[in-house]
Amino acid sequence: DQQVKQNSPSLSVQEGRISILNCDYTNSMFDYFLWYKKYPAEGPTFLISISSIKDKNEDGRFTVFLNKSAKHLSLHIVPSQPGDSAVYFCAASAAQKLVFGQGTRLTINP
Amino acid sequence: ETGVTQSPTHLIKTRGQQVTLRCSSQSGHNTVSWYQQALGQGPQFIFQYYREEENGRGNFPPRFSGLQFPNYSSELNVNALELDDSALYLCASSSSWNSGANVLTFGAGSRLTVL
């Protein structure tokens, strides 16, 4: 039972353009949603979060949008930079645990 | 402040053996969680420890067990290893005093290969 899904395994974007990563979930009881970034040989690093009572949260180049009726969230990165190339995980918070999606590999091309 | 450190970084075991993975949590954090990340998948919750007791468990069999010590460091033990246990094991620490999002700080992981 995959409660959090990232349907795009990979995404390629030109440097300077917008990157949009998507995530869908099934459980309405999640109270927070988070995005993590992972480089090879490193652990996931927290990027940004959003409460389930909000619909937008912005931090610098990163903005997360939450559409509760569609059970969908997205991460926008503007402008995309080469250092943004990594695997991005969407996660949902439930009690003591985070439920992760499968990840999307983002590649920023010069 | 020091981050989350895990050891060993890589190890190879054979089926039926037992393994112990170790984790030192970030300073100021009192809660430790363990996640298993299979190849091409997202991390999957194994269990969480708070005040040296298990405080939540995912869908993993009892041969996965853990400990948390008074200094908040932790161990993950896996008995009777199976081939499917081959994965990256991630330790994450957090603070129970933080309100809001359950932000975890992850270590770099221990990559276990079972032959």
Image (tube, coloured by chain):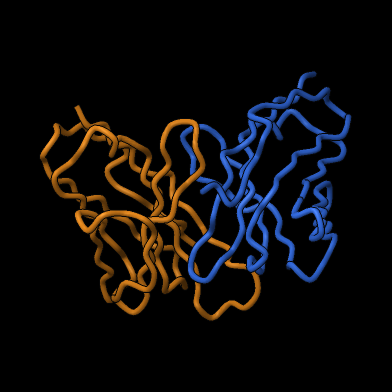
Chain colours: A blue, B orange
Report x, y in % for residue A4: 61, 49
Vertical arrangement, residue B25 with respect to residue B63, above or below = below
Quarter containing the C terminus of chain B:
top left
Vertical arrangement, residue B67 with respect to residue A16, above or below = below
Report x, y in % for residue B18: 13, 45
From the viewer's perspective, tell me whether residue A14 is left or right of residue A84: right
The answer to whether one can see residue A59 in this image is no
From the viewer's perspective, tell me whether residue A104 is left or right of residue B85: right
Give the quarter of the image for residue A103: top right
Q: Residue at x 51, y 32 (%)?
A: A40
Q: Residue at x 20, y 37 (%)?
A: B82
Residue at the outermost top position: A110
Vertical arrangement, residue B62 with respect to residue A6, above or below = below
Q: Nearer the viewer, residue A38 or B35?
A: B35
The answer to whether one can see residue B109 in this image is yes
- Give the number of callouts: 0
Q: Residue at x 59, y 63 (%)?
A: A93
From the viewer's perspective, tell me whether residue A89 is left or right of residue B50: right
Q: Nearer the viewer, residue B112 or A15?
A: B112
Give the quarter of the image for residue A33: bottom right
Report x, y in % for residue A92: 61, 58
Q: Residue at x 58, y 52 (%)?
A: A3
